[in-house]
């Protein structure tokens, strides 16, 4: 069964304290790895798509990387406004997206 | 573009009542997805459409759930009769195709008492 696992479930950082979120997947033949940000009471907001091992994408303080079995979302010098739940998803065998349960990030000033 | 539009944003109903959730996808997107999000199970795919045709409804939990897409700009998700365990946030999303990023609406928070 296709599965996406994210860790940690929750992460508390001080402002400026860099860290990484992990997403591991089991689907063979990766057709796309997606990162989303979700704020409370809102729908997931698309951040990045990665298609092949070694690929990297950046947006402000966020950088997503991809290996053959996992993806990382690196957060450099985070600010309180980066606090949110970050969701990882993979394209399943049916073409749908399979989501992990997310990492809830809290950044304290 | 206004993005994916969902209505209502909040719905409170009593057990046994019929509930209809509505979605307008982004213009030009040919895939539409319905998801349900709960704390316990996270984000689950219920059903998705391609060019208004249902492709995979294996995630629909029971026969009480049904979804339609009468045209490219409108879809409904209906629950009849509703039960307390249906309480969740329901999201609609659309995309250009399989394997492409999906854009989500703001969701409908459903509470069944």
Image (cartoon, rainbow, N blue to C red):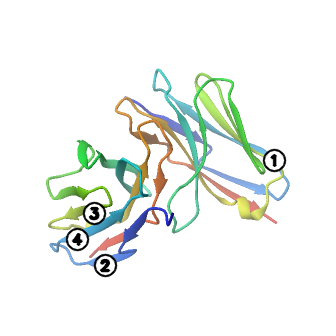
Q: Are marks 2 and 3 in contact (CB under 8 Å)?
A: no
Q: Position of residue A50 (x, y in %)?
A: 60, 34
Can you identify the residue that label 1 sits on? A76
Q: Position of residue B34 (x, y in %)?
A: 34, 54
Q: Earlier in the sequence, mark 2 or mark 3?
A: 2
Q: Position of residue B35 (x, y in %)?
A: 37, 53
In the image, residue A82 sits, relative to residue A34, either above or below, namely: below
Are marks 2 and 4 in one subunit? yes
Can you identify the residue that label 4 sits on? B19
Residue at (14% x, 53% y) in the render: B63
SS at badge 2: strand
Are marks 3 and 4 in one subunit? yes
Q: Position of residue A69 (x, y in %)?
A: 58, 24
Residue at (31% x, 78% y) in the render: B12
Can you identify the residue that label 2 sits on? B12
Can you identify the residue that label 3 sits on? B86
Q: Are marks 3 and 4 in contact (CB under 8 Å)?
A: yes
Mark 4 surroundings within 10 Å by alpha-carbon count, few (fewer than 14), some (14 through 19), many (20 or more) = some
SS at badge 4: strand
């Amino acid at each position: 069964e296709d599965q996406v696992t994210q860790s940690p479930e929750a992460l508390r950082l001080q402002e400026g304290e860099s860290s990484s979120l992990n997403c591991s997947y089991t689907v063979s033949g990766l057709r796309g790895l997606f990162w989303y940000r979700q704020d409370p009471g809102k729908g997931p907001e698309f951040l990045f798509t990665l298609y092949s091992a070694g690929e990297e994408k950046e947006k402000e303080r966020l950088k997503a990387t991809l290996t053959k079995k996992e993806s990382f979302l690196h957060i450099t010098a985070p600010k309180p406004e980066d606090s949110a739940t970050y969701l990882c998803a993979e394209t399943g065998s049916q073409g749908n997206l399979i989501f992990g349960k997310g990492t809830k990030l809290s950044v304290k000033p | 573009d206004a993005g994916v539009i969902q209505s209502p944003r909040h719905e409170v109903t009593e057990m046994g009542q019929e509930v209809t959730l509505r979605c307008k996808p982004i213009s030009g997107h040919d895939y539409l997805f319905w998801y349900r999000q709960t704390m316990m199970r996270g984000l689950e795919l219920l059903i998705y459409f391609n060019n208004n045709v249902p492709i995979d409804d294996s995630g629909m939990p029971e026969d009480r759930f049904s979804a339609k897409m009468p045209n490219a700009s409108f879809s409904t998700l209906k629950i009849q009769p509703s039960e307390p365990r249906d309480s969740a946030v329901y999201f609609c999303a659309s995309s250009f195709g399989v394997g492409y990023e999906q854009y989500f609406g703001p969701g409908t928070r459903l509470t069944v008492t």
